[in-house]
Amino acid sequence: SIVPIIADKKYHSVFNQRAFFSIREMLYVLATTVISIGIASLGEKYLGINDLSVIFITAVVFVASKTRMLAAVFSALLFFLAYNFFFISPQFTFQISAHQGVVTVVAFLGAALISSRLASRLKEQVTALKTANSYNSIMQDLGQKLSTAVDLTQVQEIAKNSLSKNLNAEVWIYFPETSQAKTALENISDKEKISADWTLKNHQPSGRFTQTLTENEWWFLPLLASKQCLGVVGLKFPNLQTILNTEQKQLA
């Protein structure tokens, strides 16, 4: 079979870069903090609830189910400070009175951190299952379409449609030993030809998202069969996309 080889270790750090906190995660944390303080205040004033820590722990689990582990831990610490500041005597300070008990407050922080970890792991598992199901569905669909192809032209057309649809990228395919090779080379610039030729000769990715010929807008991948490079696939992603996530890398 012919498969793109993209597993060179020197590229892994480029693919796996993630922002420390996304705007979405910060909004979740801040909004949930404000809402939790409001609910706890109403519960204490009108319902006479004494153990308000349950409200904040529930909020931690909610945040963890919607964000990554890092944001969940941050929310646990933030909720702990809010709980201490607004609801533990003496109020509006970060001191803890003797009758409240340091152990109780520390236990809340520990429970919040454990809850955030468990909820975050569950979310990761659910996400992984969804990704696996999506991957299997895409590959099954591709396999069925390829089984009906009768020549290389149809294979290329099926490949272009599948890559474009599932990766949201422009697709360029080059087989040097075919009659379409000259036409394919006419569709890219001289700078991109150099990158594609480097990938063909060195059997390694080049261009965007790599550390080789990085000024290109295209990401070039070698098509390898045994020890031979039969061709090159180029993928051009939207300019706003600065990195590839793990799912996109594996699917490509």
Image (cartoon, rainbow, N blue to C red):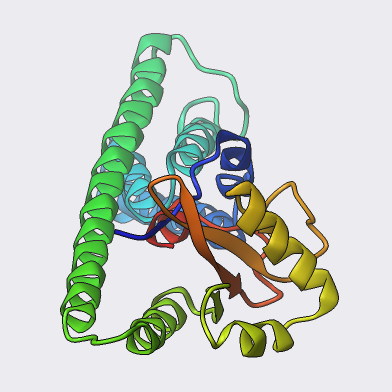
In depth, the one of 205 and 131 nearer the eye is 205
Where residue 73 appears, x then y in whole percent?
A: 46, 34
In depth, the one of 215 and 29 nearer the eye is 215
Q: Quadrant of residue 14?
A: top right
Residue lying at 47% horizontally and 56% vertically, measured from the top left: 249
| Residue 147 visible in the displayed image | yes
Residue 97 vertical placement versus 86 (above, below): above
The image quadrant where one finds the N terminus is bottom left
Residue 7 vertical placement versus 187 (above, below): above
Residue 248 vertical placement versus 115 (above, below): below
Residue lying at 60% horizontally and 25% vertically, measured from the top left: 94
- Tally the numbered discs: 0
| Residue 52 visible in the displayed image | no
Residue 141 vertical placement versus 19 (above, below): below
In depth, the one of 178 and 215 nearer the eye is 178
Where residue 108 appears, x then y in whole percent?
A: 35, 25
Residue lying at 70% horizontally and 62% vertically, measured from the top left: 197
The image quadrant where one finds the C terminus is bottom left
Residue lying at 52% horizontally and 55% vertically, measured from the top left: 25
In depth, the one of 121 and 241 nearer the eye is 241
Where residue 88 appears, x then y in whole percent?
A: 46, 29
Where residue 221 appears, x then y in whole percent?
A: 56, 60
